[in-house]
Image (spheres, grey):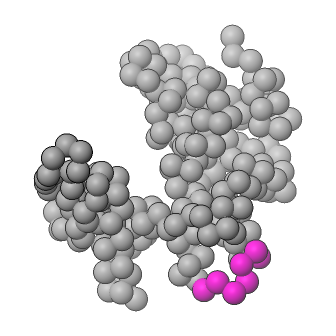
Amino acid sequence: MVDWDSCQRTLGADFNNNALLEQAFVHSSYLNENPDFTLPSNERLEFLGDAILDFVVAERLYTEFPKLPEGELTEIRASLVCHETLAEIASSLKLGDWLLLGQGEETSGGRVKQSNLANTMEAVIGAMYLDQGLTKTRELVLRQLKPFLNKVKRGEISPNYKALLQELTQSKEHLTPTYHLVAATGPDHNKQFIVEVLVESNALGRGMGKNKKTAEMQAARSAWEKLRCSYG
């Protein structure tokens, strides 16, 4: 039996409709194995939560940084709402403990997968908005993002170019970038990774780094800067 009261205490929320909270944790794999379960998956709540999150963060950045231009605000927002940040927040709240997963997803580590955690965080925000309204949802979002906003103020958060590139290509082309490892050269203690970013079959940027993550970010930055100029 899932302890939803404990979940609400963790979130600092008091839901009027507990079914909305529960739905935020229903992974599609659970429905595949439990077709008689009465609630839908969390995917629609995730869609709504993503939009609410974007709005709340944009609103706060607009207020807190009145001198920053649109481009820099966009970069910071992308870093704050990216899957890495959301997954980190969800992990700190132990949201994975309440996920309803199919057996296959359970055994493959679904409770700690970054994508599952980030999606669940967005779904919780969507559920909170429907049940509690914008004011309470804003409080939840800003409470969880406070450490990250403080890092922005201290200049410790750099732009997440992978998130920026994905936002740009999805909004303009409805396409998602993919990353391809071109080469890994040098000895094990000093490897250099070369990564190419593709949209469909078009190579848009290339990056190099001491690990694949750094190389991917450099490739994404190259592609984002190129596309941003071409799209105007």
Nearest the eye: 110 or 14: 110
Relative placement, left or right, of 28 versus 92 is left
Nearest the eye: 34 or 164: 164
Residue drawn at (50%, 16%) of the image: 34
Residue 65, how many percent across, how many down?
71, 78
Q: Which part of the image, by quadrant, shows the N terminus?
A: top right
Q: Quadrant of residue 204?
A: bottom left
Task: Specify the principal SS of the magenta part.
Answer: loop
Residue drawn at (60%, 86%) of the image: 69
Residue 175 visible in the shown view: no
Residue 219 visible in the shown view: yes
Residue 133, how many percent across, how many down?
81, 52
Q: Quadrant of residue 66?
A: bottom right
Relative placement, left or right, of 230 versus 68 is left
Residue 202, how many percent across, how many down?
18, 68
Q: Which part of the image, by quadrant, shows the C terminus?
A: bottom left
Residue drawn at (41%, 71%) of the image: 168
Q: Which residues are magenta?
A: 63-69
Relative placement, left or right, of 145 versus 5 is left
User: In the rendered image of this protein, does residue 173 appear above or below residue 65?
Assistant: above
Residue 116, how many percent across, how many down?
50, 36
Residue drawn at (33%, 66%) of the image: 218
For residue 131: magenta?
no
Q: Quadrant of residue 99?
A: top right
Seen as rendered, the residue at the extreme top is: 1
